[in-house]
């Protein structure tokens, strides 16, 4: 069962920095970086639970995509023989709260003469995971085809007869092209799969695993390398829109490169290659300071390179900037917010709270809930106050298009079971992009009912990130989330008799007031009650 633990505010104090941090420059152009394609999202969440809880609860699944082995397949071969002890780097069950990343242990590796290029081993017959569960899995082999060293893949298997694993490749019947596939490689005796190349089955469906290092198998005799790398922060947002990150790199990482850019960009093969080629070089230890370049979510993509300049590891961390002009927001009263985000991830009920709602003056239909969790019966006492954190926190909702409502990515101002929380949504990822229509078809947006003044959002399309869980990865999980806006009593229907004498104001597309817009700039023009988009001539 999923549990909710309340944490002390003692954890909220920021750690002091003993040495001057490195400063990461902002990348101005996103040309060459990709945002992904709607419809390829893996929407299920494994839930914030321990491995033991998953094994004993409904979250553990005995059904998966594993097919019965055909005659003549490696799984039916009888000539498997040991070639000695290899070393396995685990990153499959690390989605659970009590399975740390970067754990390695020895495994017996076998090959088959009738299946050249294939290997098999029992990843959990021994080692820390077996010790955690009190017994090893001596039945379920992981079969790997490395006959093509540039296109290595593994067969589906079910660890402990409860956790279905699947390599994200066409050979496992995922409906994707080879370019999208999560193939591994075999180089210098090391079979290596990158991050987000494997999935794990839960009661809700499949979700990404291998979020940290990717899994590796060092074959017998191969030199074991530590190419782990992580950038970690204590919060999603900071003073003056600056966040400090601690740099942790394995002993065999020779250099780190990073790219900081406004917006949300995932780490994938193409983006990793871009960062390796164009990224700013950093020290492999110490502290890094990043300043958000725009309001909302910002991406810090980073890669680790070996001594020969080869890309060995990669990941992305997100953080937030607050460049909203508070003068552009006005309170419209008290609304009703039904919380279904934490409720979907923990053993708590949906809760409806009275919340203060504000609306943007320059962008009517864009709303924000002020300090949304301050009145929550379970999480309210672990919310940041305006004084302790220096600013308010919001859930931003763009309902300017009634059938394309989306929740913008933003920190929530609540310190939950796994640290500070932040919200995101699939709709926010693709709104305003060239693939927005595809996102609409995929059901990523919410809706606004003007008659009842109710904003609703589809289940499992809102994402929750917690900094201490999978390094802040956003995982899908919401149910019954909605906001009933305050009754305006007809105020919105009042039209000024004459706008011609009202002063003209300009705002950029993020809602920030612009005193002197330049020629050719696309802005929002407001005069009295009239709000239009225009290009300055």
Image (cartoon, grey):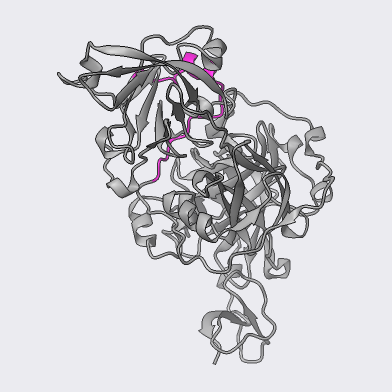
**Quadrant assignment for the N terminus:** top right
Numbered circles on residues, count: 0
Q: Position of residue 146 (x, y in %)?
A: 31, 31
- Span highlighted in magenta in the image: 41-62
Residue closest to the eye, 343 or 169: 169
- Residue extending furthest top? 135
Residue closest to the eye, 244 or 89: 89
Q: Is residue 52 magenta?
A: yes
Residue closest to the eye, 329 or 38: 38
Q: Residue at x 60, y 79 (%)?
A: 529
219 left or right, relative to 152: right
- Residue extending furthest left? 71
Would you say the magenta stretch is mainly helix, strand or loop?
loop
Q: Quadrant of residue 422?
A: top right
Q: Residue at x 81, y 41 (%)?
A: 15
Residue closest to the eye, 504 or 357: 504
Above or below, 298 against 344 in this view is below
523 left or right, relative to 156: right
Above or below, 446 against 481 in this view is below
Q: Is residue 487 visible?
A: no
Q: Position of residue 254 (x, y in %)?
A: 61, 45
**Quadrant assignment for the C terminus:** bottom right
Q: Position of residue 327 (x, y in %)?
A: 73, 70
Q: Is residue 90 magenta?
A: no
Q: Is residue 466 visible?
A: yes
Q: Residue at x 83, y 48 (%)?
A: 19
């Amino acid at each position: 069962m999923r549990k909710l633990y309340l944490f002390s505010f003692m954890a909220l104090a920021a750690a002091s920095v003993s040495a001057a941090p490195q400063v990461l420059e902002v990348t101005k152009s996103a040309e060459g970086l990709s945002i992904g394609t709607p419809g390829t999202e893996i929407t299920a969440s494994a839930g914030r639970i321990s491995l033991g809880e998953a094994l004993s609860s409904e979250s553990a699944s005995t059904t998966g995509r594993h097919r019965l082995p055909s005659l003549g397949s490696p799984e039916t071969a009888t000539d498997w023989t040991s070639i000695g002890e290899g070393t396995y780097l685990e990153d499959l069950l690390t989605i659970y709260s009590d399975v740390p990343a970067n754990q390695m242990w020895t495994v017996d590796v076998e090959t088959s003469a009738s299946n050249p290029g294939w290997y098999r081993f029992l990843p959990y017959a021994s080692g820390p995971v077996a010790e955690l569960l009190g017994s090893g899995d001596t039945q379920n082999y992981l079969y790997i085809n490395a006959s093509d060293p540039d296109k290595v893949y593994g067969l589906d298997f079910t660890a402990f007869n409860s956790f279905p694993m699947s390599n994200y490749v066409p050979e496992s019947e995922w409906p994707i092209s080879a370019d999208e596939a999560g193939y591994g490689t075999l180089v210098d005796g090391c079979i290596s799969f990158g991050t987000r190349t494997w999935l794990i089955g839960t009661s809700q469906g499949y979700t990404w695993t291998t979020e940290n290092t990717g899994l590796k198998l060092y074959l017998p005799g191969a030199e074991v390398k530590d190419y782990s790398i992580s950038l970690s922060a204590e919060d999603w947002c900071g003073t003056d829109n600056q966040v400090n990150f601690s740099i942790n790199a394995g002993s065999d990482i020779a250099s780190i490169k990073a790219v900081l850019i406004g917006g949300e960009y995932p780490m994938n093969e193409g983006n990793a290659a871009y960062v390796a080629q164009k990224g700013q070089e950093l020290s492999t230890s110490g502290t890094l300071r990043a300043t958000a370049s725009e309001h909302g979510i910002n991406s810090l993509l980073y890669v680790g390179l070996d001594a020969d300049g080869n890309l060995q590891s990669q990941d992305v961390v997100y953080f937030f900037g607050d460049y909203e002009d508070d003068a552009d927001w006005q309170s419209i009263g008290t609304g009703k917010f039904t919380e279904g985000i934490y409720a979907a991830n923990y053993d708590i009920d949906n809760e409806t709270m009275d919340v203060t709602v504000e609306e943007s003056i320059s962008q009517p239909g864009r709303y924000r809930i002020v300090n949304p969790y301050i009145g929550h019966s379970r999480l309210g006492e672990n919310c940041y106050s305006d004084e302790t954190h220096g600013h308010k926190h919001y859930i931003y909702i763009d309902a300017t298009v009634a059938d394309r409502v989306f929740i913008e990515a933003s920190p929530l101002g609540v310190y939950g079971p796994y640290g500070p929380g932040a919200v995101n949504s699939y709709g926010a990822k693709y709104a305003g992009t060239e693939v927005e229509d595809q996102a609409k078809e995929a059901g990523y947006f919410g809706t606004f009912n003007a008659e009842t003044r109710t904003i609703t959002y589809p289940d499992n399309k809102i994402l929750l990130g917690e900094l201490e869980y999978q390094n802040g990865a956003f995982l899908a999980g919401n149910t019954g989330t909605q906001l009933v806006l305050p009754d305006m009593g007809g105020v919105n229907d009042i039209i000024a008799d004459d706008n011609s004498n009202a002063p003209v104001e300009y705002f950029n597309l993020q809602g920030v007031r612009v005193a002197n817009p330049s020629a050719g700039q696309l802005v929002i023009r407001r005069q009295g009650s009239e709000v239009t988009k225009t290009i300055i001539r």
